[in-house]
Image (spheres, coloured by chain):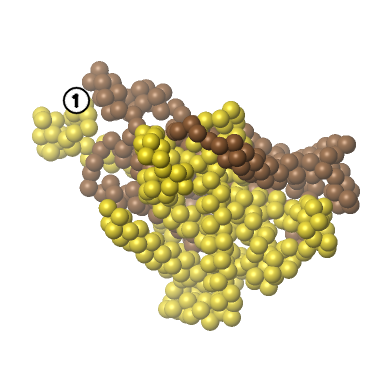
Chain colours: A brown, B yellow
């Protein structure tokens, strides 16, 4: 791009970018310092912006009182399994959708994209009944199965864009050398596509990690609950347990934020490939 | 060629040496099967089954009678005294959320196009709202908009904009403003990412040529940048309209649709109806939402196509 940028334009630009950065990060800052305030200090006036004392009481209590460790473990297990399996399955479908042309291809892509437009709630009742019939209500495997299904369409579209950017010749050569199609996919393409696969996995993981309504509907017993269900539990109809909530929120946000920061470059790439070339 | 013939005869010889041309029906089917099974069983089957509930008496409080009731559930929706409020809230929620998201996201993406120091870090930091669930964002903003201990009232009074704390979420006239602020904060990132991605497809030479002709910056924006990425812009707006319309999480966590239904939109209405156990009526609301979005998407895509034809 051309290199003339007036001093005023530059100033406006950086003031705006700086302002937006502050606006973006402030809520995170606020919830973090709230989580380190003592219960009394959360509800005291005037508000403290630069706390001088840090208390980890909220965190201690969270694990002691609310079984948060169990929920955390469940969330890690369910999200990791669901994100791994769905990424794997999406790789297979993205591969054929990127490499072959066949008659129902457009319809299949539309069917995947249309899932993004359906309000989840219309499926919630029947899904519950389906899970009753399969004997999978209040069962982590049941939740994983649904999360896998939910993650497949978007990651297929995303990975398809990545595949389209890799030349056919790569696996063609491998197959002529005697590898099977699956062998070529996993031994030759996967290493090349690592950024895309990592991006899809992280995207799926974060989506499962954050999902609320399905887990609230399907998980009843304490030993099966995931973090969002626990967060929902801190809300009664008139009140929120802010000290537990703030600590739980920090523990929920920080892992996904770290993952996202790590993958942000790949995600831009993935969306470019998936959406723009779609 | 030999393989093709073999396949047609039903022979199982693998088309190993014909990699992407020829017939690959079985490969395609086998690779698509797992995805099809999952999406079919856990998304489409419940969705279709849920749709027929809209025409039945389907209430958790009375599961013995699940008879067909025709359009009764739909009639109940339209006759609900709050229908008009919910309709206008839904429109306000979408329009007032998407316009600032688009403008701020566009501006940031344009500015991020040019390299500067710490751009990568900046990008990673401003993407972070996207890593948080809508529900948690609702909770965060509910805390910040709290009338007594909320930081927003405190900041506003510190800079002298207000002298009385505003009960943002309890006051029907301000609750919608508060939920939209939260949604804008969340949604800018998506526009930034999509537009930033699209901007990478605009060749630098176009700007260089325009600069030689003496074109001004705004002129380049409207005659080069926007026309080149208009497909992405159009699709991003369409996706976001659908998504925001369908997105109850933030409102659910901040206000639950209150006070006095002033932040109730179609999908939060669907949530509360589902939680009441009235699946029939909730499904009817869901079908209505799908119908509205379908009509919107069709008209929108049509309008976009016509515009393109006029331009070219």
Horizontal side of residue A134 vs B257, given as left or right: left
A170 relative to B119, above or below = above
Pointer 1 residue: B17
Q: Find numbered disc 1 in the image and state the secondary structure of the residue it sits on.
A: loop
Q: Position of residue A194 (x, y in %)?
A: 44, 27
Determine which quarter of the picture holds residue A52: top right
Chain of the residue on which disc 1 is drawn: B
Q: Residue at x 70, y 53 (%)?
A: B141
Which residue reaches farthest front?
Answer: B214
Q: Residue at x 85, y 49 (%)?
A: A47
Residue A12 visible to an observer of this rendering: yes
Q: Position of residue B12 (x, y in %)?
A: 19, 33
Identify which residue, A5 or A189, lies in the foreground: A5
Q: Position of residue A275 (x, y in %)?
A: 40, 44
- What count of labels does the image hold? 1
Identify which residue, A162 or A139, lies in the foreground: A162
Identify which residue, A227 or B297, lies in the foreground: B297
Q: Residue at x 53, y 51 (%)?
A: B103
B59 relative to A194, above or below = below
B284 relative to B206, above or below = below
Identify which residue, B142 or B30, lies in the foreground: B142
Determine which quarter of the picture holds residue A155: top left
Residue A135 visible to an observer of this rendering: no
Horizontal side of residue A268 vs B230, given as left or right: right
Quadrant occupied by the N terminus of chain B: top left
Horizontal side of residue A102 vs B289, given as left or right: left
- Please rate how many residues cluster around mark 1, counting C-alpha atoms within 10 Å: few if below 14, some from 14 to 19, many from 20: some
Q: Residue at x 35, y 62 (%)?
A: B303
Q: Position of residue A32 (x, y in %)?
A: 75, 41
């Amino acid at each position: 791009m051309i290199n003339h940028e007036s001093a005023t334009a530059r100033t406006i630009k950086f003031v705006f970018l700086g302002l937006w950065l502050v606006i973006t990060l402030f809520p995170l800052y606020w919830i973090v310092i709230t989580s380190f305030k003592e219960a009394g200090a959360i509800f005291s006036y005037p508000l403290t912006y630069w706390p001088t004392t840090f208390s980890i009481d909220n965190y201690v209590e969270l694990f002691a009182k609310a079984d948060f460790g169990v929920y955390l473990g469940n969330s890690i297990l369910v999200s990791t399994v669901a994100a791994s399996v769905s990424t794997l399955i999406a790789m297979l479908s993205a591969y054929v959708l990127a490499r072959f042309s066949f008659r129902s291809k457009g319809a299949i892509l539309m069917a995947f994209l249309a899932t993004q437009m359906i309000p989840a709630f219309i499926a919630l009742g029947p899904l519950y009944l389906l899970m009753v019939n399969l004997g999978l209500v209040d069962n982590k495997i049941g939740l994983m199965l649904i999360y896998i299904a939910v993650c497949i369409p978007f990651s297929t579209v995303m990975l398809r864009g990545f595949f389209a950017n890799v030349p056919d010749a790569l696996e063609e050569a491998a197959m002529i050398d005697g590898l099977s199609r699956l062998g070529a996919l996993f031994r030759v393409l996967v290493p090349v596509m690592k950024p895309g696969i990592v991006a899809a996995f992280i995207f799926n993981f974060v989506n499962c990690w954050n999902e609320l309504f399905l887990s609230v509907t399907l998980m009843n017993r304490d030993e099966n609950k995931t973090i969002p269900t626990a967060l929902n539990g801190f809300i009664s109809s008139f009140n929120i347990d802010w000290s537990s909530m703030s600590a739980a929120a920090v523990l929920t946000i920080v892992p996904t934020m770290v993952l996202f920061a790590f993958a942000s470059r790949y995600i831009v790439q993935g969306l470019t490939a998936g959406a723009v070339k779609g | 060629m030999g393989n093709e013939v073999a396949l047609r005869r039903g022979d199982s010889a693998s088309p190993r040496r014909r990699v992407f041309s020829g017939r690959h029906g079985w490969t395609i089917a086998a690779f698509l099967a797992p995805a099809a099974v999952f999406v079919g069983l856990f998304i489409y089957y419940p969705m279709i089954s849920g749709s027929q509930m809209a025409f039945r008496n389907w209430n958790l409080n009375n599961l013995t009678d699940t008879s067909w009731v025709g359009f009764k559930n739909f009639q109940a929706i339209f006759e609900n005294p709050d229908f008009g409020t919910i309709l206008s809230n839904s429109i306000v929620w979408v329009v007032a959320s998407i316009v600032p998201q688009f403008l701020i996201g566009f501006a940031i993406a344009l500015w991020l196009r040019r390299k500067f120091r710490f751009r990568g870090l900046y990008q990673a930091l401003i993407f972070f709202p996207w890593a948080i669930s809508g529900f948690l964002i609702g909770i965060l903003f509910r805390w910040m908009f709290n009338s007594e201990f909320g930081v927003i009232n405190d900041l506003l009074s510190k800079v002298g904009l207000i002298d009385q704390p505003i009960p943002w979420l309890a006051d029907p006239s301000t609750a919608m403003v508060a939920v939209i602020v939260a949604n804008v904060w969340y949604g800018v990132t998506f526009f930034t990412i999509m537009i930033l991605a699209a901007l990478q497809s605009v060749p630098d030479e176009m700007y260089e040529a325009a600069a030689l002709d003496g074109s001004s910056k705004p002129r380049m924006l409207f005659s080069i940048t926007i026309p080149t990425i208009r497909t992405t812009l159009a699709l991003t707006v369409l996706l976001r309209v659908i998504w925001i319309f369908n997105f109850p999480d933030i409102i659910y966590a901040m206000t639950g649709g209150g006070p006095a239904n002033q932040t109730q939109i179609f999908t939060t209405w669907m949530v509360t109806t589902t939680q009441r156990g009235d699946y029939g009526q909730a499904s009817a609301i869901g079908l209505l939402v799908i119908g509205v979005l379908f009509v919107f998407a069709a008209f929108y895509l049509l309008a976009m196509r016509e515009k393109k034809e006029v331009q070219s």
